Image: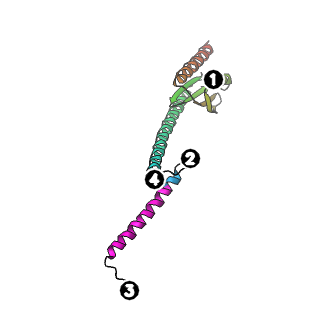
């Protein structure tokens, strides 16, 4: 016996809608799998999942902007250090840049001035900030380029550290002139 369907378009619409819902569910699931989750074991509603994904994407975007600023700032520090080095300056040079909750320090010293780097690290430790990274490169026979990256807890620490380090390097430079 053949069943006559008086309204075949209604069945087609139901089928199309069911496939659309299945596809949307798969896409939501894929999006949800890309977002890091808190350790909560309870099910999260779809609107909450979308809010969580939106907030996560916004935080990634803000983090990317902060990292770009830091990269540009460090690039500027290196360029300024290279400029001072190209002018034949062997006296210690320091550039300090605050980027969010980070501090980037570029320090140029003579090859025999390792104590300047050591004293810089000592001052930083006295201020109780975290040294994230410290590197050096020997650029030519008598120039060492140091970079130090710090994480600062309180905003006033950046100003204190900058002031102390600039004073220290200035004092070393002044004592080398005599």
Numbered-mark total: 4
Please give the residue where the numbered disc 4 appears in the rendered image: 46
| Residue positioned 61% across, 22% down in the render | 127
Q: Which mark is residue 160?
A: none
**In this rendering, which labeled residue sits more in front, label 3 or label 1?**
3
Please give the residue where the numbered disc 3 appears in the rendered image: 2
Dots 3, 2 in contact, CB < 8 A = no
Residue 27 higher or lower than 61, as above or below: below
| Callout 3 secondary element | loop
Q: Earlier in the sequence, mark 2 or mark 4?
A: 2
Dots 3, 1 in contact, CB < 8 A = no
Residue 125 drawn at (x, y percent): 64, 24
Residue 10 higher or lower than 63, as above or below: below
Residue 171 drawn at (x, y percent): 59, 15
Magenta highlight range: 1-30
Please give the residue where the numbered disc 2 appears in the rendered image: 40
Q: CA distance from mark 3 to mark 1?
A: 91 Å
Quadrant where the C terminus sits is top right
- Neighbor class of circle 2 (other Cα within 10 Å; few <14, some 14-19, many 20+) is few
- As drawn, the residue found furthest toward the left would be 6
């Amino acid at each position: 016996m053949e069943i006559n369907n008086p309204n075949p378009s209604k069945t087609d619409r139901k089928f199309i809608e069911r496939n659309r819902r299945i596809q949307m569910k798969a896409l939501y699931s894929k999006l949800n799998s890309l977002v890091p989750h808190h350790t909560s074991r309870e099910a999260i509603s779809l609107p909450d999942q979308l809010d969580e994904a939106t907030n996560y994407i916004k935080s990634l975007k803000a983090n990317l902007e902060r990292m770009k600023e830091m990269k540009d700032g460090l690039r500027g520090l290196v360029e300024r250090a290279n400029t001072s080095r190209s002018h034949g300056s062997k006296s210690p040079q320091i550039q300090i840049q605050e980027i969010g909750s980070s501090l980037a320090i570029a320090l140029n010293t003579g090859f025999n001035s390792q104590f300047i780097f050591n004293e810089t690290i000592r001052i930083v430790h006295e201020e109780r900030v975290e040294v994230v990274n410290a590197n050096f490169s020997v650029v030519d026979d008598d120039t060492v380029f140091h970079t130090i990256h710090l994480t600062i807890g309180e905003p006033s620490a950046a100003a204190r550290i900058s002031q102390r380090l600039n004073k220290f390097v200035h004092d070393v430079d002044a004592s080398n002139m005599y």
